[in-house]
Each structure stands twice: as structure tokens, then as C-alpha cells.
């Protein structure tokens, strides 16, 4: 952490230098065309003049002239003369955009010049005749301070075997060579290959996946800084790897400057020798094992005593609890165990009495429902047959309106009867699935409820695909659709109700939609005896029947609020 903070201070300082000099650098850049005269451009004179005129003593200036082949044809920094910038697609495109006038100027992020180990920020502008690009470089030399810190760190940390510092900008990662500052000016594609190699080394130790691979870097199609951010999206921006074979602990740490929008970063690779640490850990492990062994033996002796003297009595009581039988003939010298035995026997007797009572009540309740359903069946059939005859005989329009209301009420009663009949028989009757035409069934049930809807001043709109088939029992699907439509009629606050059945390649979706207040408990609404509106009368069993049918067939059920409507959706997987 101390190493990281020290190098971060250097990076912050460099970024501060570039930030504070920005206005003056732009002023010098915009003055470059004034010194250009029909191809003549004295780069050395301008570089000296700008450096002398600069208000800052922490940087100097370099000036370059770039032709339309993207070659640096002249420059105050001699190693750059003849440098081919077209060998990096991104740089080539930036230069071309300024040549074409798509950009008036271009400003780079601070870049590490490997040949001098200086940080340089480049500014581009087109010459008045459009034949050349005029480039200004603001140079900050942080190498000496960085090298002092580098060797100080190596000396202060005895276990540190290797320390590498990399500089990362928008598109490249470069190793800062503290042993040999001045190096040959490598071509851009060579620098790009080295960046790819460094990135692959980091990825080898990082537990992270990236889309594609590092070949995209070689193809020059991505911004490297974003890839680096993704790799180091870890706790504390640190990648750790233990190399047991070579007794090494490898750290990669990324350092971002104080200016958050800057894409320049430092990456520190630190390799520590873990031999002494492993020896210490082994010593601690042996001590721990010895202490652990002593503790285990002690616990075993105590445990054995408790099992033999005390817990056998508790195990006897627990065994009787599991078997649901009374504990008898057990005497203990421990008062608490005797109390536990007496309390258990007392609660056991009371509980068994309650269980028997509830069993009788439940059986009587089931028998009552079954008997009631059977008793209702015959009068329901008589009412239905005779009412159909009455409807056909009566022609008076005024009476017919009342007849329709009675018919709607009979239909509602019939729907409740069907629910009770299903509940009474679903434990004894096997409802086998069949190849069912859901489209026809939905149309039939909508037609059945149309009179009820009319009596309640509601209209049912349908959007039903033809010939939608699914393997489900007819009666169970009828209960599913009937309970949803009847609820929509009962609770809708507007006349329009929507029933939709749509088939997709991998699923069938049934939706019943009605306008109303948002359902407060969309999960509990499917539970037995739950009613969203306490002032509405009802049995509170309809949606629970629907839930049980859905779970039987693996149908996904849900309710949600959409465009002012409560939507009940059922997804049948094909």
C-alpha cells in the first residue's frame, strides 16, 4: 500500500502539470500556423522559443511537422524524424481526421515516449496550406524522481524479488525501464505487440473474462484503457496470485491519478519471495494442530461423560417424541430432565386430543362439502333446464331483461358450484390430461360469462389465436379460466375486460386483464381464503384452485400491474 501511494503521488503530480499547462499549450498550438510559410517551418526555433516563453519550469516543448504519408519529416526531437505514424491504425485515423478538417485540433492523453522515458502530451493542428500537420509536444520529465522511488522501494522491502512499473494510456502499455533510460525508437507496431504481451501476462493471473481476446488489441479495434479498467475491476484494484511452485506471491496493482477522467494509469507488478512466510505458516500450522489435538481429546472425554451420564436420558425422551408416544418408567436424578419428561407427557396428551378433535372436524367438513355438492346438483339441473324453457317461452322485452339478470345469477351460482365440486372430488377423482384445444375452450368460457358480464355492465374483449393445443385436463383448464374471468368481472372498475391467448414458438401465454386498483399482495392473492378486498363477498378459494392446477402442470403463474390494469398471466411451456 505504501508503494502504491508513493507512485500515485508521482502520477498525480504529472497529471497536475499537464492539467495546469493546458491553456498555455493551446495558445502555443494555435500560434503554430502563424510561423508556417509555404512548407517552411523552423521546428527547433519554435521549440526553444516556446520553452523560453513558458510560464512553467516543469516542462519543455517539442515541435514536429508531419506529411500526408503520416511520416514525421522534421522535429526538434531528432529520434522522431522519419517515424511512421501510419503503423498504428488509431493514430493514422486521428491524423487523417485533422487533415480532412473533421477535427480542428486533436489533443492526446499523456504518452510515455520509450526512447526517452519522458511523458509527452501531443497537440495537432493543420498547416494553412493543408499539406502538413503541425504538432506540439509538451514534455514532462518525471523519470529521475520515479527511479529514485523505484530503487528506494527495492531496497526497503527485503522479500521483494521483482518490481516492474508499467505506464498505460488510451491505447498502449509500456514498461518503464529504470535501468536503461535511453533506448532505440521502436516502430509503433512493435510497441503494440509489446502492449499485447504485457496485457496477456496480466490476464494470466487475473480471474476475469473479457469478450473476444487480446488479438483485438493487435487489430487495433479497441481502446486499451477500457479493457484495463475491466480487468482491474476487483477489490482495491488489486490482482493477487500465489505461485506455490516457485514460492512467489505476485501482485498487480493499478494506480489512477487524481483526475478521474484521465485515462493514464500506472500498473505495478510486485513479486515477493514467500519462502520465509511459508516456513512461518508451516510452524504455526504444526502448533495449531497440536493445540487442536489436545482440545479434541479433551472435548471427546467430556462428551463421552455427558453421553454416558446425562444425554442418554435426553435421547430417550427425544426418541419418544419422534415416535409420538408417552414417556414412562424413566427416573432421573437431574431435576430438569424429570421436569422435561413431565411437561412433554402433559403436552403430548393435550396435543393428541386436539389432533383427534381436528381430524374429526376436518372429516366432517369434507363430508359436509361433498354432501352439499351432491344435494345441490339435482336442483341446479332442474333450475337450469326449466329456466331454459322459460326463456324460450317469454317474449316480453321488459321481462326478458329481468330474465337475463336471473340467468347471469344462475351462471355465477353454477361457477361457484363447479369450484366446490372440484374441491370435493380432486382427492378421489383422477383428472387425467388430454390433448385440449385451448382456443375453443377459452371461446366457450368467454361466451358462458358474456351474460354475467353484461349483467354487471362489463364487456369481454378477446384476442385468441386459433388451434392452440396443450396437454391438460378439460375440467381443470375450465376452472383456471373461469376463476380468472369471474374475478375480472367482480373487481374491474371499468367496463372493458381483456382475455388473450397467444401462441409462441416455445410457449403459450394466457392473460386476463381488467382495470382496477393495483393488487397489494400479488403473491398472497393465490393463497387459500385470501381476499384482496374484505368488503367483497366470496369464498376465497378460486385463485387457490388456479394455483394448485398450475403447479400440477408446471404452468408459470403471476399477476402484475400494467397500464392501469391488473394482469393475471399464465405461461404454458411447450
Image (cartoon, rainbow, N blue to C red):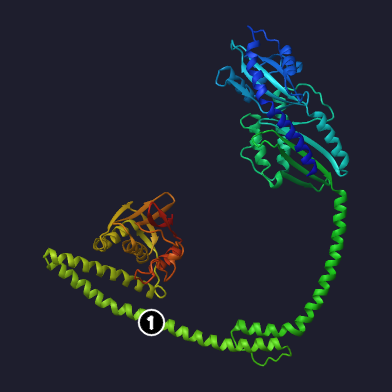
Task: Tell me if residue 221 comes above or below residue 533 in the rendering.
Answer: above
State how many labels appear.
1
- In-image side of 549 versus 151 (left or right): left
Q: Report the residue at 31% width, 62% height from top.
A: 489
Q: Report the residue at 62% width, 87% height from top.
A: 343
How busy is the neighbourhood of tag 1: few (under 14 within 10 Å), some, or many (20 plus)?
few
Closer to the camera in the image, 24 or 548: 24
Q: Report the residue at 74% width, 24% height from top.
A: 56
In x, y percent, where is residue 345? 60, 89
Q: Report the residue at 75% width, 38% height from top.
A: 8
Quadrant in the picture for residue 302:
bottom right
Quadrant where the N terminus sits is top right
| Farthest front residue in view | 55
Task: Tell me if residue 123 comes above or below residue 394 in the rendering.
Answer: above
Secondary element at image label 1: helix
| Farthest left residue in view | 396
In x, y percent, where is residue 505? 42, 49
In x, y percent, where is residue 359? 46, 83
| Farthest bottom residue in view | 329
Q: Which residue is mark 1?
A: 367
Quadrant in the picture for residue 171:
top right
Residue 173 visible? The answer is no
Task: Tell me if residue 138 comes above or below residue 549 in the rendering.
Answer: above
Residue 552 visible? The answer is yes
- In-image side of 200 versus 457 (left or right): right
In x, y percent, where is residue 325? 60, 87
Task: Tell me if residue 256 comes above or below residue 143 in the rendering.
Answer: below
Quadrant in the picture for residue 365:
bottom left
Quadrant where the C terminus sits is bottom left
Amino acid at each position: 500500500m505504501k508503494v502504491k501511494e508513493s507512485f500515485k503521488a508521482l502520477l498525480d503530480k504529472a497529471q497536475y502539470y499537464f492539467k495546469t499547462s493546458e491553456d498555455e499549450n493551446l495558445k502555443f498550438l494555435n500560434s503554430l500556423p502563424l510561423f508556417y510559410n509555404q512548407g517552411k517551418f523552423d521546428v527547433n526555433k519554435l521549440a526553444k522559443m516556446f520553452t523560453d516563453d513558458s510560464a512553467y519550469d516543469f516542462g519543455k516543448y517539442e515541435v514536429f511537422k508531419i506529411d500526408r504519408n503520416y511520416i514525421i519529416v522534421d522535429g526538434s526531437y531528432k529520434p522522431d524524424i522519419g517515424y511512421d505514424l501510419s503503423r498504428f491504425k488509431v493514430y493514422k485515423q486521428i491524423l487523417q481526421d485533422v487533415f480532412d478538417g473533421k477535427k480542428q485540433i486533436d489533443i492526446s492523453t499523456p504518452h510515455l515516449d520509450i526512447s526517452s522515458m519522458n511523458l509527452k502530451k501531443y497537440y495537432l493542428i493543420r498547416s494553412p496550406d493543408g499539406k502538413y500537420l503541425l504538432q506540439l509536444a509538451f514534455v514532462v520529465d518525471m523519470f529521475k524522481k520515479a527511479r529514485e522511488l523505484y530503487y528506494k522501494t527495492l531496497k526497503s522491502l527485503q522479500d521483494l524479488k521483482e518490481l516492474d512499473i508499467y505506464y498505460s494510456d488510451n491505447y498502449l502499455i509500456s514498461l518503464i525501464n529504470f535501468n536503461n533510460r535511453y533506448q532505440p525508437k521502436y516502430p509503433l507496431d512493435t510497441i503494440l505487440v509489446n502492449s499485447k504481451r504485457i496485457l496477456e501476462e496480466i490476464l494470466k493471473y487475473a480471474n476475469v473474462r473479457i469478450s473476444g481476446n487480446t488479438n483485438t488489441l493487435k487489430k487495433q479495434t479497441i481502446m486499451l484503457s477500457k479493457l484495463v479498467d475491466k480487468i482491474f475491476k476487483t477489490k482495491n484494484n488489486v490482482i493477487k496470485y500465489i505461485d506455490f511452485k516457485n514460492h512467489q506471491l505476485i501482485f498487480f496493482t493499478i494506480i489512477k491519478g487524481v483526475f478521474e477522467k484521465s485515462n493514464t494509469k500506472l500498473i505495478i507488478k510486485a513479486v515477493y519471495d514467500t519462502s520465509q512466510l511459508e516456513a512461518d505458516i508451516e510452524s504455526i500450522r504444526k502448533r495449531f494442530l497440536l493445540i487442536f489435538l489436545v482440545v479434541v481429546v479433551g472435548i471427546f472425554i467430556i462428551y463421552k461423560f455427558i453421553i454416558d451420564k446425562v444425554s442418554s436420558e435426553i435421547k430417550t425422551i427425544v426418541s419418544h417424541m419422534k415416535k409420538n408416544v408417552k414417556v414412562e418408567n424413566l427416573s432421573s436424578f437431574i431435576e430438569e430432565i424429570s421436569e422435561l419428561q413431565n411437561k412433554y407427557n402433559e403436552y403430548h396428551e393435550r396435543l393428541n386430543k386436539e389432533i383427534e378433535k381436528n381430524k374429526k372436524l376436518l372429516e366432517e367438513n369434507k363430508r359436509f362439502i361433498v354432501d352439499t355438492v351432491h344435494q345441490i346438483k339435482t336442483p341446479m339441473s332442474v333450475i337450469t333446464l326449466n329456466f331454459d324453457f322459460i326463456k324460450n317461452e317469454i317474449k316480453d322485452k321488459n321481462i326478458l331483461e329481468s330474465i337475463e339478470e336471473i340467468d347471469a345469477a344462475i351462471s355465477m351460482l353454477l361457477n361457484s358450484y363447479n369450484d366446490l365440486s372440484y374441491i370435493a372430488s380432486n382427492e378421489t377423482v383422477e383428472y387425467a390430461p388430454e390433448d385440449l384445444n385451448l382456443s375453443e375452450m377459452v371461446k366457450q368460457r368467454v361466451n358462458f360469462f358474456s351474460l354475467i358480464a353484461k349483467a354487471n355492465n362489463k364487456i369481454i374483449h378477446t384476442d385468441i389465436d386459433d388451434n392452440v393445443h396443450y396437454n391438460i385436463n378439460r375440467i381443470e383448464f375450465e376452472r383456471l379460466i373461469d376463476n380468472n374471468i369471474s374475478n375480472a368481472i367482480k373487481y374491474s372498475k371499468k367496463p372493458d375486460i381483456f382475455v388473450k391467448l397467444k401462441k409462441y414458438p416455445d410457449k403459450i401465454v394466457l392473460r386476463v386483464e381488467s382495470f382496477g386498483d393495483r393488487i397489494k399482495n400479488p403473491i398472497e392473492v393465490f393463497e387459500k381464503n385470501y381476499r384482496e378486498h374484505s368488503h367483497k363477498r366470496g369464498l376465497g378459494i378460486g385463485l387457490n384452485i388456479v394455483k394448485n392446477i398450475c403447479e400440477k402442470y408446471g404452468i408459470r403463474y403471476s399477476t402484475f400491474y400494467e397500464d392501469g390494469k391488473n394482469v393475471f398471466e399464465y405461461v404454458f411451456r411447450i
